[in-house]
Image (cartoon, grey):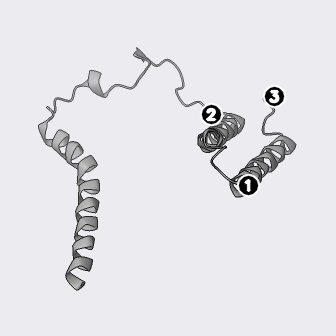
Amino acid sequence: MSDNYSYNYLFIAIFTAVAILFPLLPIVLAHFVTPKKPSPIKNATYECGMETKGETWVQFRVQYYLFALLFVIFDIETIFVYPWAVAFNKLGLFAFVEMIVFLGILALGWAYAWKKGVLEWI
């Protein structure tokens, strides 16, 4: 029994090593393989393929960030609601109540954001 237990952890260790090495190996390999020929043109700052003119530092209003954050939250909500709606007939009353609670929490967050004026552009 003890050997079988250790054998299961061996698979977890191999999986973890592969999960770490798989993204790191191409990055390290690219570092050694790519040619390094720096030049002023390659090191120049550009914006959309054109040289910048004037001040390049632009501060965005925080409302843009908050609006994008709300979009991501409700986009993730769609990811949770869609499978639930597809399997609605197979799920019981408990799943229905859980989805109502989930949507209620999101509605409270949306109402809070609305009350704080996050959804106002100007």
Lateral position of residue 57 relative to residue 29, left or right: right
Q: Quadrant of the C terminus?
A: top right
Q: Any mark on residue 59, and which? A: 2
The residues tagged by marks 3 and 2 sit, at their Cα atoms, a distance apart of: 16 Å
Q: Residue at x 46, y 19 (%)?
A: 52
**Viewed as shown, does residue 103 lie left or right of 2?**
right
Question: At 71% across and 58% down in the image, what residue appears?
Answer: 94
Q: CA distance from mark 1 to mark 2?
A: 49 Å
- x%, y% of residue 61? 69, 34
Lateral position of residue 87 relative to residue 121, left or right: left
Q: In this view, which residue lies farthest toward the front? A: 90
**Residue 110: image location, x then y, percent:** 78, 43
Q: Residue 87 or 56: which is nearer the viewer?
A: 87
Name the mark nearer the viewer: 1 or 2. Answer: 1
Q: Residues within 10 Å of mark 1 (few under 14, many from 20)?
A: few
Residue 11 versus residue 42: which sits nearer the camera?
11
Q: Which residue is painted at 28% across and 56% down in the image?
A: 20
Q: Residue furthest bottom?
A: 2
> Callout 3: few (<14), some (14-19), or many (20+) C-alpha neighbours within 10 Å?
few
Amino acid type at mark 3: Ile
Say which amino acid is labelled 1: Leu
Q: CA distance from mark 3 to mark 1?
A: 43 Å
Per the image, the residue denoted by label 3 is: 122
Secondary element at image label 1: helix
Q: Which residue is mark 1?
A: 93
